[in-house]
Amino acid sequence: MGSTTIHFPENILSRIDRAAARRKMSRNRFVLEACEAALAEDAGEWPEGFFEPAFSVDEKFMLREAVIELEETVFLSRRNRGVPLL
């Protein structure tokens, strides 16, 4: 089985813990079952035509610039990757 790390805000994490305790299950099992339920309901499906918008040339340029800016910000903000500091 694969694994992943998910970062939750404290208020959400405490709600997850309380819900898991009420069901007498681990936090991991609760999150896994919640994901399975969401997938079973097709949660997260993109609306029809979502990826086919009619952007103008200017809008495409602005979108491309925004994506580059976002990627740079994320890259510069990463704290848990790269060579460890000794």
Image (cartoon, grey):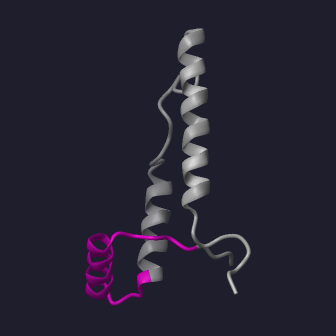
How far from the left and from the top, in percent, is residue 65?
Answer: 58, 29
Q: In this picture, is 43 found above or below 68?
A: below
Is 65 a magenta residue? no
How far from the left and from the top, in percent, is residue 26?
Answer: 42, 87
73, 8: nearer the viewer: 73
Is residue 34 visible in the rendered structure shown here?
A: yes
43, 68: nearer the viewer: 68
Q: Residue at x 63, y 76 (%)?
A: 3
Quadrant in the rendering for residue 27: bottom left
How far from the left and from the top, in percent, is residue 64?
Answer: 61, 28
29, 65: nearer the viewer: 65
Q: In which quarter of the image is the C terminus?
A: bottom right
Count of marks overlaid on the render = 0
Along the horizontal axis of the image, is 58 left or right of 33? right
How far from the left and from the top, in percent, is residue 42?
Answer: 48, 47
2, 84: nearer the viewer: 84
Is residue 55 visible in the rendered structure shown here?
A: no
Q: In this picture, is 79 found above or below 29?
A: above
Q: Residue at x 26, y 75 (%)?
A: 15
Numbered range of the magenta stretch? 5-27
- The residue at the far top in this view is 56
Along the horizontal axis of the image, is 43 left or right of 79? left
Q: In this picture, is 7 found above or below 17?
A: above
- The residue at the far right in this view is 83
